[in-house]
Image: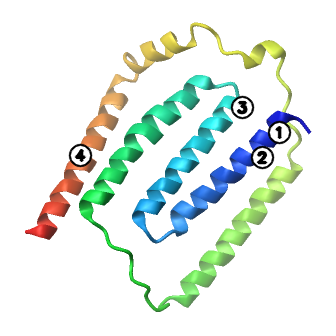
Amino acid sequence: MSLELVVFAIASGLAIVSALAMVVVKTPVRSVISLVVTFFALAVLSILLAAPFIAAIQVIVYAGAILVLFLFVVMLLNLTKEAEATDRRPIQKLLGLVSVVALGGLLLGVTLRAGAPPVPAAGGLIPAKDEIPILGRLLFSDYLLAFEALSVLLLLAAVGALVLSKRRFD
């Protein structure tokens, strides 16, 4: 068993567990913290796939900037712990559980039937030296509109959260 396989197993398990915790946890702050752990685990997986630039972007942009913005908005909204309610929809919970088990079984079956991926040559794992400048040129030329639309969307989300929180207090 190689060290890469052990690191992959730990990082992928941590990503799955923390992603599930993000969905299941009732407290919004803990949910955001679980998402941060998920992003760090995904960055480790990106490093294992010989994509250090994607891993750095994952940590700097997503875990560093966007999730801090999420955490700030959650704290700004001053959300209290969700009250435990009685179960009013048992059929929906049962159908959801059956769907999750069926989808998980389907994914497990497809994964087990698929053969091992081809092992690339040793030179294929090392990223090219001029990969990042090409990506930067593409981002600020061909994909500039999508890049700016995403930044405006994030700004509108933050302003919307601020407006919603002000309306609640007034």
Neighbours of disc 4 within 10 Å: few (<14), some (14-19), many (20+): few
Residue 105, percent across and down? 78, 65
Q: At 80% from the left edge and 58% from the top edge, which residue is drawn?
A: 108
The residue tagged 3 is 48
Q: At 36% from the left edge and 52% from the top edge, which residue is drawn?
A: 71
Neighbours of disc 3 within 10 Å: few (<14), some (14-19), many (20+): some
**Quarter of the rendering containing residue 147:** top left
The residue tagged 2 is 9
Residue 137, percent across and down? 43, 13
- Report how many numbered discs are placed on residues in the image: 4
C-alpha distance separating marks 2 and 4? 38 Å
C-alpha distance separating marks 1 and 2? 6 Å
Q: Name the residue nearer the viewer: 120 or 25.
A: 25
Residue 79, percent across and down? 31, 68
CB under 8 Å between discs 3 and 4 = no
C-alpha distance separating marks 1 and 4? 42 Å
Amino acid bearing label 2: Ala
C-alpha distance separating marks 3 and 4? 35 Å
CB under 8 Å between discs 2 and 4 = no
Q: At 37% from the left edge and 16% from the top edge, which residue is drawn?
A: 141
Q: Quadrant of the N terminus?
A: top right
Ranked by sequence position, the earlier of labels 1 and 4 is 1
CB under 8 Å between discs 1 and 2 = yes
The residue tagged 1 is 5
Identify the secondary structure beneath mark 1. helix
Identify the secondary structure beneath mark 4. helix
- 24 to the left or right of 77: right
Q: Quadrant of the C terminus?
A: bottom left
Q: Nearer the viewer, mark 3 or mark 4?
A: 3
The residue tagged 4 is 156
